[in-house]
Structures are given as C-alpha cells and as structure tokens.
Image (tube, grey):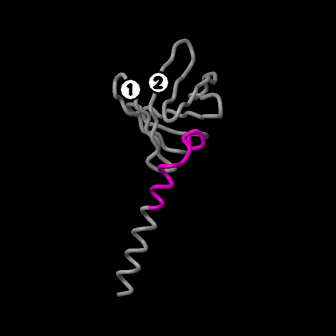
Amino acid sequence: MWVRKLVLISMVQALLHGCVNLNANPAEQLLGKWQADIAGVELLVEYTQTTVQVGESAPVPYALTGNQLTFTNGGSQKRVIMFSSKREMTQTDPLTQTERIYTRL
C-alpha cells in the first residue's frame, strides 16, 4: 500500500516539475551561454537582456515577444523558441521549419 502512495506522489511531483518548466518566463530562460552543433561545427552563442553574440562576432540586438525571437540586424530574422528543460532550447525558423537544438553551458 505504501509503495503505491510513494509511486503516486513521485508521479505528481514529476508532473508539477514539468509544469513549472513549461510556465517559466522565456526571457529569463534565454539568458546565458548556449552551444549547438551545426553540421559538425560547434556554435557558441550568448544572450544578454538585449543582445545575442555568436562566437566572436559583434553582439546583435534582438526582441523577444512571448516565445518569438526576432533579430533586428539588417532585416528581421525570426525564430520560435521552446525550452524542453532548463538545459535545452530548440529554435525553429518559422519559414523553413528548420530546428536547431541548443544546450546551456
């Protein structure tokens, strides 16, 4: 009997933990350093509250509205971001549906 209760409690905790991750603020989750592997090439990016820097290139301003990320340098590239965990972010290009998975450093 106590084993069933323990399993039930564990399942509820896991469900609630998942809900907490899904309801987190994307603007807060985005901040920091991330890494992706693009066709065998390591890509390092760092997000501040207003800019993103890719590798050693100059920082580029961005805007985040909900989960839509818009880069505002010489045009407006858009990405839809999703966080499957605190350490993993997926960016999807809405035009091509290309997904890129980033891991937090």
Secondary structure of the residue carrying tag 1 is loop
- Residue 28 bears which disc, if any? none
Quarter of image, res 72 = top right
Q: CA distance from mark 2 to mark 1?
A: 7 Å
The image quadrant of residue 8 is bottom left
The answer to whether residue 86 is left or right of residue 48 is left
Residue 40 in the image: state x and y as whole percent: 40, 33
Look at the image and give the residue range highlighted in magenta.
16-30
Name the residue located 56 percent from the left edge and 30 percent from the top edge: 64
Q: Is residue 64 above or below residue 5?
A: above
Picture quadrant where residue 80 is located = top left
> Is residue 29 positioned above or below 64 on the image?
below
Does 47 sit above or below residue 8? above
Q: Residues within 10 Å of mark 2 (few under 14, many from 20)?
A: some
Please state the horizontal and vertical placement of residue 96, each as a whole percent of the image: 34, 23
Query: 50 left or right of 104?
Result: right
Residue 20 falls within the magenta-colored stretch:
yes
55 in the magenta segment: no
On the image, numbered disc 2 is attached to which residue?
78
Judged from this view, the residue extending furthest toward the bottom is 1
Q: Which residue lies under the disc numbered 1?
A: 94
Q: Amino acid at mark 1?
A: Pro
